[in-house]
Amino acid sequence: MSSLLNKKSIDDIDVKGKKVLVRCDFNVPLKNGVITDTNRLTAALPTIKKLIADGGKIILCSHLGKPKGEPKPELSLAPVAAKLTELLGQEVKFAADNEVVGPNAKAAVEAMKDGDVILLENTRYRKEETKNGEEFSKELASLCDVFVNDAFGTAHRAHCSNVGVASIVDTAVVGYLIQKEIQFLGNAVENPVRPFVAILGGAKVADKLNVISNLLEKCDTLIIGGGMAYTFLKAQGKEVGKSLVDDSKIDYCKEMMDKAEKLGKKLLLPIDTTITKDFPDPIDAPIDVTVVDTIPADMQGLDIGTKTAELYADAVKSAKTVVWNGPMGVFENPILAKGTIAVAKALAETEATTIIGGGDSAAAVNNLGFGDKMSHISTGGGASLEFLEGKPQREIIKKESGADSVQALDCFSGVGSVLLI
């Protein structure tokens, strides 16, 4: 852990008068060109402000959506530049350039003064980005003297704008956001204050196979909710009706229940369920629901029931560390959000360190108004999952990208991921 948290950061370098390329995660939701959630922008501000104060010339870059290697106006980062200008209180010049590092971007960088900030166009306008292509990596690196990786949301990807650049530039460090993510996720799972409770939800068991196994070895209590719970319930021999089930994972669920028993860990599963006949269409449509202990053959479970919500909330009360990844039900529908609300409320009221693992659980906590009550909300769903499942990311990235330099590996893949939780 100490080697992880002692990685070089922006506090360890002098950026005065230097061009600093910062990989951020500005993959924000847009509706009609308007940003509907600014959390990822706000999370990047401490690093940007520090570099401004230190007299650097700050060049921001990020991807947005999946343009698949071609310019798409609806996925331009222009709205991000405008919103950042508002949030920072100084101009963030947008370097509109479909080549990302084309004539306009190069001219904008050349004209920069100390403390200036510019934002490059969507890095995924270039098809080489997601393939870690050498040419685009070199183009990005040519813009800067220093590279800062502060994009935890893409820390598990081997792309030009993180591993490619980091393997070329002389100085590559991490920003405050990645430091914070590693500190919370790393310490919470590797050195938790106990009792340590982990809560896993979401739709599919397959998405969290390794997470379940790894967390059983780390936590004191593992709580299962969401669609994935029904595969566990079927593995127990219970009726699940038309609920979402992955029959190919029944044996795996049995193995995990046996593992929990052998390790002396609590594995909590739903004891009642909120059911309905058909999945809501659209997802937020009004529906009739019933809370039952046993699911009839023609019904499906879409949220945990009231007794389960009380059971889970009670388990959280005595915890000192809680990690939560995945909602308890179809929280996008207000009628089916009660279980997720109950868990979020329990976390908000506990004195434990509470860590929300990005993705849908982060959206649920923020949308339901509990965001400011949590110790930490991760900005990366996929990246946080890889931490929770204990992936040795250094080896994964070497295999995917061919990156061999310690600098490249340390600077982006979960800050080196020497932490194998």
Image: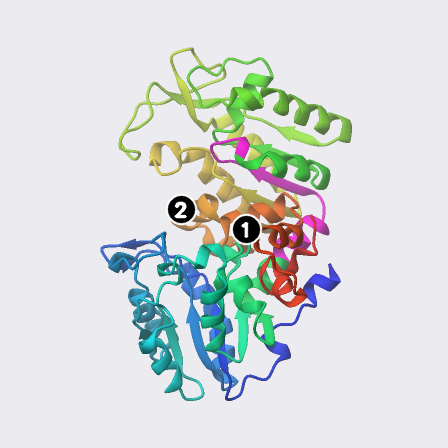
Indicate the secondary structure of the residue bearing disc 1: helix
Of all residues, the one furthest to the left in this rendering is: 32
Which is nearer the eye, 92 or 18? 18
**In the rendered image, which quarter is residue 78 located in?**
bottom left
How many labels sit on residues?
2
Mark 2 or mark 1: whose residue is earlier in sequence = 2
Of all residues, the one furthest to the front in this rendering is: 135
> Where are the magenta residues, as a range?
183-206
Amino acid, disc 1:
Ala
C-alpha distance separating marks 2 and 1: 23 Å
Q: Is residue 223 above or below residue 92?
A: above
Residue at (27, 57) in percent of width and height: 72
Measured as percent of width and height from the top left, residue 164 is found at 53, 64
Amino acid, disc 2:
Leu
Q: Mark 1, residues whose alpha carbon is within 10 Å: few (<14), some, or many (≥20)?
A: many
- Whether residue 318 is visible here, answered yes or no, is no
Indicate the secondary structure of the residue bearing disc 2: loop
Which is nearer the eye, 55 or 338? 55
Q: Which residue is mark 2?
A: 368
Scheme by which the image is coloured: rainbow
Q: Which residue is mark 1?
A: 383
